[in-house]
Amino acid sequence: MMSLFSTGTELSRFRKNGALPKIAIAVMLFIPLIYGALYLWAFWQPNEEMGHLPVALVNEDAGSVKDSKAVNYGDELYDKLIDGADLDWKSVSAEQAAEGVADGDYYFSVTVPKDFSANVTSPTGDAPVSAQIKVNYNDSNSFLASTLGQQAMKQLRDTVRVTVGEESAHTLLAGLNDAGDGLRDAADGAGQLTDGLTTASTGLGALSEGATTLNDGMGVLNSGVATANGGAQQLSSGSSQIAAGASTLATKTDELASGLVTASDGANRVAGGTSELLGKATNELAPGAVALDSGADALVAGMTQLQEFAKANPNVPVSALSQQFDALMTGTTTLKAGTSGLVLGSTDLVNGVTELNAGAAGLSSGLATAASGSGELAAGAHTLAESTAQLSSGAQTLASGTSQLATGATTLADGTTALADGAKAAVDGSGKLLDGSTTLHAALVEGGEKLPNDSASLTDKKSEVIAQPIELHETWDNKSPSFGEGFAPFFIALATFVGALITWLIMRALPTRALAAGATGLRATLTALLPAAAIGLGQVVIMMLVLVYGIGLEPQYWLATSAFIYLITVAFLAMQQAFIIVFGTAAGRVISLVLLMLQLSSSGGTYPVETTPQFFQFLHPYMPASYVVTGLRQLITGGVDYRFWISLAVLVGILVGSVALSAWFAGRQRVWTMKRLHPALSI
């Protein structure tokens, strides 16, 4: 390990000539760190430092009216942005914003237009329009700042969309709720209507039943009336017949009187006939009865013998008549008994006839006449009885009909009562029906007014606006057409600085021969600088040709861009030449390398310098590359203003100052010393 610093090794020379070689060792150790860590430190989290990015904020919203209330969504957005501090918002007027973006005081501007609130609430009207947030960029300030701004504005747009979308959804839901209230009222009205219809239906049913009952009662009543009418007719007919019977009875009574006169005559004749009958009965009937009785005895005796013979001789054919003989025998015996009675009766008859003949001669005739009159009287009485029966039947029929009539009347009364109750229920139901219908109509009208009734095209437009309630209206003062063109100033600055560094690696920054010949320090400086500047011109020409015709870079000012790049090249050559002449070749080149890294991280060529740590923000105005980037942005992108002229003046100052410094130090190096012959650090 110690052999590394032994005599003859490369590191051994760093042990001599004081502290500078040792510092050089330290620089070599830290160069990778500077290039590796410094750049990462500068751009470690630029998105987290966006709050330092100055942005103009203009609020011109005039507000609007929503649901009879004044609203101003622009003020709400303004307050939210200011309070959020996601960017370094600067509240300015529209004129100040335009001037600030053009001059580089603000990287971009955000404007809330005067119709912002009106457009936010427009989906509820007939002319829906998406609300706009106007953003104006200027890539001449910083291409990456514009890019970051676009990302921030998209996030802002999405955030506002959510807020406005919630507001629109709230408005929509509020409208639907209001319409729902109307529909609920309509539902209540429909319920009342249903109840009324139910009540009316029930009442109408009862009314129908009452009408049916009434109809049935009317039928029964009609039937009873018809029956009563029929009974009355029968009663009338029976009464007529009674009258006729009574008339007949009177007539027959007269005839009875006449017949009684005739009966008197007949009685006389009966008396004569009775006398004659008495004579015959006495002379003829008694002897005949005796003879008949004797014959009957003989017949009985003969029949008895015949019957015994038949029983004794059963095989004789006469036995077949035994049953008939038995019957005949029984009849003969009966006849014998009758003849015996006849004999006795004839005797009694003779006695009776004798008595009859004694007192019934005249009576016989009168009774005959009376019997005749009595028959007619009976006939009249019979007729009267029949008429009376018919009258009774008619009276019963009439009573039955009257009963049916009463029942029908009762049924009719019940039906009429039911009909009245049903009618009342129907009236009540119709009242509820009217109330429910009125409520339903009013609720439906109110709900219909709250619900949109838009055309298909208007509905589509509203849908689009509700889906995209916020739009970004982005404009550019000076727009870089491509990402590469936006970063071109930074890389051109890097290229020219590295080109100068390589040039002085190959060429000598201070020709010693010119000094030895007595040339002034300025002449000696220019003797080295002018050839390097010629090389630099070639570098610029080649680079511009490739950038423009090879890659496609389109500077707004082609010739001015080329001339400015050449000025940058010469200025960097002069500056690095001064480092070498003043600090020596090795130290000067190391300083150039360190300065290169510091410029890359603090020039603002990539991320805006406001997003870098304070260390780099402090270095920014002192780094030549900061002015290189600013000047090239305005020449390539457009929008040349005072900043370009400042950049031009700074670069000219660097060129002149570096040449002057080199000339002064070169003039002091005419005399060679041991230190110059053996520098503490050399390359």
Image (cartoon, rainbow, N blue to C red):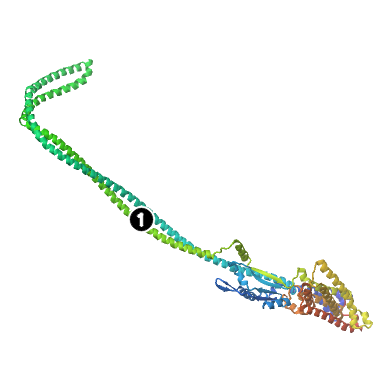
Instruction: Tell whether 219 sits left or right of 628.
Output: left
On screen, residue 331 versus residue 667, left or right, reads left
The residue lying toward the viewer, choosing from 554 and 498, is: 554
- The quarter of the picture where the C terminus appears is bottom right
Q: Is residue 421 left or right of residue 601?
A: left
The residue sitting at 17% across, 17% down in the picture is 306
Picture quarter with the N terminus: bottom right
457 or 303, nearer to the observer: 457
Q: Furthest residue to the right? A: 517
Is 447 rendered above or below residue 29?
Answer: above
Q: Amino acid at mark 1?
A: Leu
Horizontal relation, residue 265 to residue 10: left or right: left
Nearer to me, 262 or 602: 262
* Circle 1 residues within 10 Å: few <14, some 14–19, many ≥20: many
- Regarding residue 348, the answer to whether it shows in the image is no
Q: Position of residue 389 (x, y in %)?
A: 21, 42
Q: Residue at x 55, y 66 (%)?
A: 175
Q: Which residue is mark 1?
A: 419
Report x, y in % for residue 555: 79, 71
User: Which SS class for mark 1?
Assistant: helix
Question: Which quadrant of the figure has residue 118?
Answer: bottom right
Q: Residue furthest left?
A: 358
Using the rendered view, name the quadrant where residue 650 is placed.
Answer: bottom right
- The reply to whether residue 521 is in sight is yes
Q: Residue at x 17, y 21 (%)?
A: 329
